[in-house]
Amino acid sequence: MEDLLQGKIIHTRIDEQVIFSQLDGNTNAVWSLLLASGYLRVEQAALGRRGKLEYGLKLTNKEVRMMFEQMIEGWFADYTPAYNAFVKAMLLDDIKAMNVYMNRTALATFSFFDAGNKPSETTEPERFYHGFVLGLMVGLTDRYHITSNRESGLGRYDVMLEPQRAGDPAFVLEFKVRDPEDEETLADTVSAALRQIKEKAYDTELLARGISQERIRHYGFAFQGKTVLIG
């Protein structure tokens, strides 16, 4: 969704026979429904690797983009002051405040059903946290290019914020759910996240675009149920 909000094209297959029962867990079905509803338009079409037709989709117009931005902001409307405070704390590199606000909102909004208490083979809890934090960044789209799950260096980072203004810091965020078998504390999980950013050289893309190492901040997010630790 962040690509669409930035005016980019997403590539996917389309199912013209989509039914609502498919929407849970079927990304292609969601895009198919948005296309059929007129929120997306086809920019290109080509045969994919398996010989199936894949489409390049884009938001229909500026009004639709604004509608989706407002919708995402609305999901967080009940806790807007805390969310805004979290973003401000991150921009100021105030890790203590980031932890305070994130734990406050986590306690109020996370459910153990959504978040889980341990990592699973399908990494669903980690995806939930990833999506939650990414949603907090919507208000920064006028200052940052926000991307997620992209290749950089030797792997795929979770979230990257590339500044549009000279002098603003860049950010690389990595999320991990604590694994009791490997990590005794959440602090160990934070260390593992930060170590992964460094070992996988996730800064590579930012450095290639002329952003100095001194301007790049790393944050590791460790989660366990409704408890969060950022370092």
Image (spheres, rainbow, N blue to C red):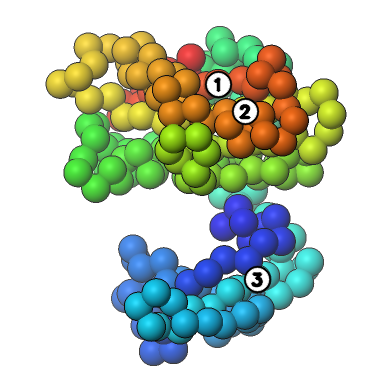
The residue pinned by badge 3 equals 58
Residue at (22, 12) in percent of width and height: 184
Q: Is residue 212 left or right of residue 188?
A: right
Q: Is residue 96 left or right of residue 90?
A: left
Residue at (28, 24) in percent of width and height: 178
- Work out whether mark 1 precedes mark 3 in sequence or the reverse, and give the earlier one: 3
- Label 3 sits on a secondary structure element that is strand
The residue pinned by badge 1 equals 218
Q: Is residue 19 above or below residue 117?
A: below
The reply to whether residue 27 is in sight is yes
Q: Give the quadrant of residue 63.
A: bottom right
Q: Residues within 10 Å of mark 2 (few under 14, many from 20)?
A: many
Residue at (28, 12) in percent of width and height: 185
Q: Residues within 10 Å of mark 3 (few under 14, many from 20)?
A: many
Q: Position of residue 194 (x, y in %)?
A: 44, 19
The reply to whether residue 158 is in sight is no
Q: Is residue 221 above or below residue 147?
A: above
Please, what is the three-letter code of the amino acid marked with disc 3? Lys
